[in-house]
Amino acid sequence: MDVEIQQPQEVGKSRIVKVDKDEAWELFTSQASNEGRTVVAHFGASWCVTSLSMNYKFEELAQTHPEMLFLFVDVDDVQGVSSKLGVKAMPTFFLVKGKEVLKKFVGANPDELTKMVDSDSDAPTLPDIVIE
């Protein structure tokens, strides 16, 4: 399988990686799992105003948590993963470790996003949500 990985389009020094294919999601989450890194994923769309309104907070958290991998997943480009994870509204955020979803929340709530990222990564996983 030949996957072309695009680096994030940098505005300044962005630490967010844009995922534009299902295969790229699999590659990034597998690599993070192998490295023991937590993944913070923002599922949104370029046309969704509420999703775009969270970009500043997502970028801020990516800058202050360099040990984590921050992914922006466009639901229009990565429909398979979006469907598998049950993304029905935007923005939807996931905290993933070891290919297991630890936390999920839906909505444009900067405080909730901060709380999720700062939460204990040893929290119990959500049932029946495993990334394969």
Image (cartoon, rainbow, N blue to C red):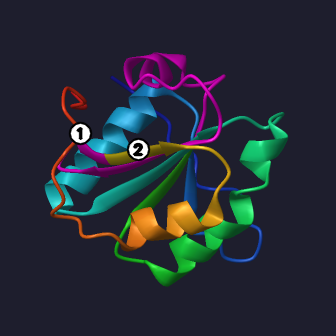
Tag 2: amino acid: Lys
Residue tagged 2: 104
Circle 2: is it few (<14), some (14-19), or many (20+) Cα within 10 Å?
some
Near-viewer residue (66 or 10): 66
Most foreground residue, 119 or 83 = 119
Q: Quadrant of the N terminus?
A: top left
Magenta stretch, residue numbers = 73-102
Q: Which quadrant of the figure contains the C terminus?
A: top left
In the rendering, at what x and y percent does residue 43 appear?
A: 57, 39
**Looking at the picture, how far across and down is residue 83, in whole percent?**
46, 17
Is residue 36 found inside the magenta-colored segment of the image? no
- Label 1 neighbourhood size at 10 Å, few (<14), some (14-19), many (20+)? few
Residue 45 screen position, x and y as percent: 72, 35
Badge 1 marks a residue whose secondary structure is loop
Residue 21: image tag? none
Give the residue pinned by disc 1.
126
Cβ–Cβ below 8 Å for labels 2 and 1?
Answer: yes
> Disc 2 and disc 1: Cα gap in Å?
8 Å
Front one among 13 and 95: 95
Q: Residue at x 84, y 33 (%)?
A: 47
Q: Residue at x 37, y 68 (%)?
A: 68
Q: Is residue 117 above or below residue 75?
A: below
| Amino acid at dot 1 | Leu
Quadrant in which residue 39 is drawn: bottom left
Question: Please, is residue 34 above or below residue 68 in the view?
Answer: above
> Is 118 situated left or right of 87 in this image?
left
- Write the residue at 50% across / 36% down: 4
The picture places residue 15, in percent across and down from the top left corner, at: 56, 68
Q: Is residue 128 above or below residue 63?
A: above
